[in-house]
Image (cartoon, rainbow, N blue to C red):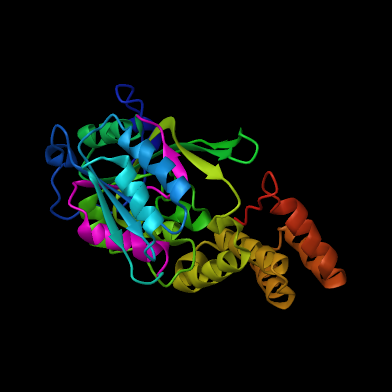
Amino acid sequence: MRTDAGSLSRSRCRVRRTGFPTPVRDLPCLSKLVSPSPAISVIIPTHHRPALLARAIASVVAQTHRHLEVLVVDDGPSESAADAVRAAADGRLRYLSHHVTRGAAAARNTGLRSATGEFVAFLDDDDTWLPLKLVRQLEPFVTGTADLGVVYCASLKYSDITNRVISESPARPLRQGHVDFLRSTLFGTSVPLIHRRCLDEVGPFDESLPGAQDRDMWIRLARRFAFDFVPDVLVWHHIHGDQITSNLSKKVEARELLLVKYRAELEAHPDIMATYLWRLGMLCCADDRHPAGRRHIWQAVRRQPGLRGAYRDLLHSLIAPRSFQRRLRDGVFRGADGVPFYY
């Protein structure tokens, strides 16, 4: 089913239809599957950040939708995380733990295996939700069609360092379904509400990826199901200096692995592939991997000769690699309040 997104605007719910998946086999309208107060499983992976975890838990406990189970998955057990769960004093919370550190994707999958709700929402331990987040995202499912699987929302970045809003990420309609996620991640793990049966069909998070597990999941979901959104800012991403977006080596490795995993689909869209390679090349050069970076940028300009900025970057990296690295770190990936954003 392919539908013009603009023609499906629904003022009653203030949401707009997005996404162009293939039809779902033998799946009844999800509105018939949504009970008056559906159970939502909230999964919070955490690792040695008890103060941030306590704040995240508080934002979930404050949700106006009350029919929740909250699964806190400690990625490498620590008494401080267990204490944060106990301190919340809410019977809807459950504490799970790994014996050894396995990564955020594995923690989310552990939570999924124990989740019992009709819907699933993930919350990173350093993010927070506004109280109406889940209520607002349930609305499109009530009136939605059979292929609706994911509802996302707007979000903002807030600096815990200088106590200010850094930027807002509005929720915009998808134009090309899963192809949009080949271009960009668009939103993080803390943003969407997902119907559980959709996650069961596409499978768990890819634990082999050191980052970008969310982008990989959105690609797989958008191949199969429709995405919808509410325009409200309902998620705050807190900037504090200890997040994966600041780990350059992991970001490079994750992008390289995604390139291998989705090469055929990227090659089918030369403009997207060129932009992807250019960005990967810049990240490599910022990480002091200049030969690999130049190779990626050269592949980008071969595919899209009109990328003038890529020619400039290739020349700069050849003539003055250290100067180019500083320009990337201090400019392109500078971020905010001393925290780099390696997107």
Q: Is residue 314 left or right of residue 117?
A: right
Return the x and y of residue 41 as percentages of the image width and height: 25, 47
Q: Is residue 288 left or right of residue 153?
A: right
Q: Residue visible at 29% across and 22% down?
A: 12
Q: Quadrant of residue 45?
A: bottom left
Of residues 86 and 320, the one drawn nearer to the viewer in this rendering: 86
Return the x and y of residue 112 as percentages of the image width and height: 26, 58
Q: Extreme bottom residue here? A: 291
Q: Is residue 230 left or right of residue 144?
A: right
Return the x and y of residue 88 as percentages of the image width and height: 32, 41
Of residues 135 and 269, the one drawn nearer to the viewer in this rendering: 135
The answer to whether residue 197 of the structure is visible from this angle is yes
Q: Is residue 153 left or right of residue 331?
A: left
Q: Considering only vertical position in the picture, is 91 above or below 302? A: above
**Chain part drawn in magenta:** 102-131
> Is residue 117 inside the magenta stretch?
yes
Q: How many marks?
A: 0
Q: Quadrant of residue 60?
A: top left
Q: Residue visible at 47% across and 51% down?
A: 180
Q: Residue visible at 58% across and 40% down?
A: 160
Of residues 124 and 233, the one drawn nearer to the viewer in this rendering: 124
Q: Extreme top residue here? A: 12
Return the x and y of residue 30 as percentages of the image width and height: 18, 42
Work out which quarter of the rendered image holds the C terminus and state it. bottom right
The answer to whether residue 44 of the structure is visible from this angle is no
Q: Quadrant of residue 202?
A: bottom left
Of residues 311 and 1, the one drawn nearer to the viewer in this rendering: 311
> Is residue 103 inside the magenta stretch?
yes
